[in-house]
Image: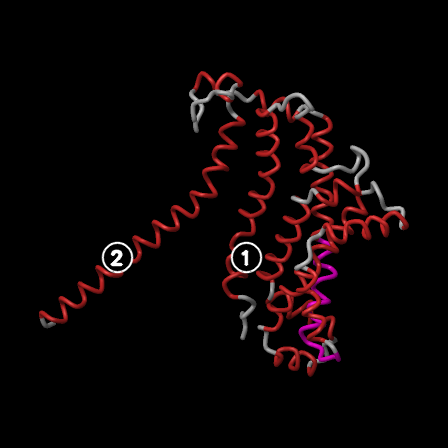
Amino acid sequence: MSVRTHFTTRLDDDVTARRALVVYALLFLYYGFFFVPILWLVSSSLKADAILFSSDLVLLPPPEHFTLANYQRVLSDRLFQGYFLNSTAVAVQTTVLTLLCGVPAAYAVSRFDFPGRDYVVVGFLSSQMLPLVLVLIPFFTVMFRLRLIDTLLGLVLAHTVVSLPFVIWLLKGFFDGIPQSLDDAAMMDGCSRIQIMYRIIIPLSLPGIAVAGFYAFLASWNDFLFVSVLSQSDATRTLPFGLQLFQSANQVDWGAVTAAATLTMIPVVLLFALVHRWLVEGLTTSGMKGS
């Protein structure tokens, strides 16, 4: 290797190292912007009132001010327990129903060439551009006529209607990445369209389905707008509404509120930890598996 080549290689390595340092520094600032509030929330839920309302910024509570009383107070609250069960039931049923409807619909839009197909896809995207508050009153009227006000089924249907357009559009992208030749070969072997979908398309699109399912679960779990309108009693209210349990007109129990918010966040974090490999693969490959 000549001196010039060695110098050029070393210069390129230095430039690459600087770029990597800048990229990691920016990533550290970016994720710090999100993780510091979460860390503060968890830390506040473990603080005693004496330090929680202190004017000094204390991120981690000292041992003498560390307490689990906030979590004990929240977990012993029967209403909070009921809200947690309602959130779990509604989110799980919404995810299942959204995927049961979204997968066949996305397969049909991806594989069948029918008049107005492009307009259907544009309609799915256009529905996500409008604020949900615009459809809240008409949706309430429909639910009232169907006698689904103050029912868990009404919440499941509302959350499914909100999540389904985006899920169909997302899954269509994954299905488009699977070669049509696989469908043709399966049809030559005697498979029906339904068999092709369940035996070929779905196994090849599991990362995309995981992304869609996670989105549907998250949208249902975090919803407050429809719950505040469609739920009329504690029997159907969910966790986002339940955070109001620990505040009144005169004061807010911040220790209990931060503990409740932390408990509300835990199921989503656990679900992400379980499916993060599929989520990363689904978001990076964009359904190109098998193409």
Q: Is residue 70 left or right of residue 162?
A: left
Residue at 68% in and 30% down:
244
- What's drawn in magenta, residue-wise? 96-115
**Quick one: label 2 or label 1, which is nearer the N terminus?**
2
Q: Is residue 163 left or right of residue 61?
A: right
| Residue type at numbered disc 2 | Ala
- Indicate the quadrant containing the N terminus: top left, top right, bottom left or bottom right: bottom left
Q: Position of residue 258 (x, y in %)?
A: 57, 30
- Indicate the quadrant containing the C terminus: top left, top right, bottom left or bottom right: bottom right
Residue at 60% in and 41% down:
267
Give the camera-side residue of 148 and 6. Answer: 148
Q: Is residue 159 left or right of residue 55?
A: right
Dot 1 falls on a residue whose secondary structure is helix
Q: Position of residue 115 (x, y in %)?
A: 75, 80
Res 16 → quadrant: bottom left
Q: Position of residue 145 (x, y in %)?
A: 90, 50
- Residue 90's place in the image compared with 277, above or below, is above
Q: Which mark is drawn over residue 278?
A: 1
Q: Is residue 140 magenta?
A: no
